[in-house]
């Protein structure tokens, strides 16, 4: 927290944190007045909201499916297969994306051509960047993120299912009226936390997938901060952008928590 004041100073190594000139809101105004501000904000929000919409429901659905599948051996196989992608590093994952979707040698384009289609430059075309980023993230994190929902489902009273069976409820009805309400508090808490980081899109994967052809949609706040702070050495400017990012996340987190608390009482505090 002590270093936050860098965002309000013209930081130099000679002056240090307290010895650098105090410039107030200069860097914030510079960022808000930048022609890139609108593009960065739009790209960040679109990618983040798209990620939430795709990646948050996926582990819930997977956990419900695994929980209601008979046979422990089959469950263990499915859990292992879906967990494994989480242990692939971001660098390796992006390398796999580039290999699979390569214009000349990727098996996706090979398959498209074998079916009579035309090969597409998925890596370089801006309209495909967000889809590749989000859905590879779904594949990688879905199994691992389902663990907490599986744990929540194990706490649902089995007697409720037995009573529902006696009343003639089918499997889908039991999932909808017993399992989902049983894990709803867990879903709400995790959703609040996820919404509270809506401005914090993962830097590493975006940066590794970024190139000059898709830069119009792949340049987000976190990659811009890295380029300004580490490459251009504008430390105060990048600190101001990072502080703005965190303040927006905090405000959204508080609002999401307040709305959840007013709706049914489940909240972080």
Image (tube, rainbow, N blue to C red):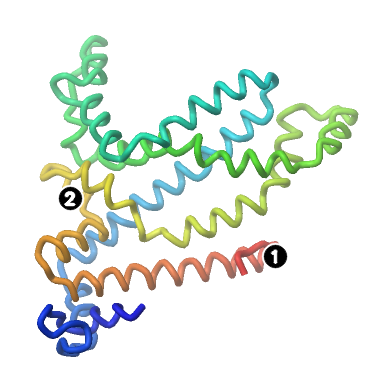
Q: Is residue 6 above or below residue 140?
A: below
Question: Seen in the image, is 247 located left or right of residue 183?
Answer: left
Question: Seen in the image, is 52 located left or right of residue 62?
Answer: left
Measuring from the top left, give residue 208's x and y in whole percent.
21, 43
Numbered circle sitting on residue 265: 1
Task: Residue at 61% x, 19% y: name it.
Answer: 74
Q: Nearer the viewer, mark 1 or mark 2?
A: 1
Measuring from the top left, give residue 195's x and y in whole percent.
47, 58
> Callout 2: helix, strand or loop?
helix
Question: Seen in the image, is 52 located left or right of residue 44?
Answer: right
Looking at the rendered image, the quarter that the C terminus falls into is bottom right
Residue indicated by mark 2? 216
N-terminal of the pair, mark 1 or mark 2, is 2
Measuring from the top left, give residue 3's x and y in whole percent.
29, 78
Badge 1: residue crowd in 10 Å (few <14, some 14–19, many ≥20): few
Task: Residue at 60% x, 65% y: name it.
Answer: 268
Measuring from the top left, give residue 117's x and y in whole percent.
22, 16
Give the quarter of the image for residue 76. top right
| Cα–Cα gap, marks 1 and 2 | 42 Å
Looking at the rendered image, the quarter that the N terminus falls into is bottom left
């Amino acid at each position: 927290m002590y270093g936050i004041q860098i965002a309000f100073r013209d930081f130099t190594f000679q002056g240090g944190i307290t010895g650098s000139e105090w410039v107030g809101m200069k860097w914030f105004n510079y960022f808000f007045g930048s022609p890139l501000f609108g593009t960065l904000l739009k790209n960040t929000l679109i990618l983040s909201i798209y990620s939430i919409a795709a990646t948050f429901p996926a582990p819930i659905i997977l956990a419900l499916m695994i929980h209601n599948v008979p046979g422990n051996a089959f469950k263990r196989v499915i859990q292992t297969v879906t967990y494994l992608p989480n242990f692939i590093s971001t660098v390796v994952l992006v390398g796999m994306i580039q290999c699979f979707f390569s214009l000349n040698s990727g098996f996706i384009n090979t398959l498209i051509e074998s079916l009579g289609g035309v090969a597409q430059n998925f890596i370089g075309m801006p309209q495909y960047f967000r889809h590749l980023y989000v859905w590879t993230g779904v594949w990688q994190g879905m199994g691992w993120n389902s663990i907490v929902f599986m744990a929540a489902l194990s706490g649902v009273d089995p007697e409720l299912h037995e009573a529902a069976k006696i009343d003639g409820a089918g499997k889908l009805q039991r999932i909808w009226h017993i399992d989902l309400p049983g894990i709803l508090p867990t879903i709400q808490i995790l959703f609040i936390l996820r919404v509270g980081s809506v401005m914090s899109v993962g830097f590493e994967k975006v940066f590794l997938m970024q190139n000059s052809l898709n830069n119009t949609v792949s340049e987000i706040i976190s990659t811009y901060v890295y380029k300004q702070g580490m490459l251009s050495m504008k430390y105060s400017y990048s600190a101001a952008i990072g502080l703005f990012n965190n303040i927006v996340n905090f405000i959204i987190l508080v609002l999401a928590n307040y709305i959840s608390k007013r709706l049914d009482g489940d909240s972080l505090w």
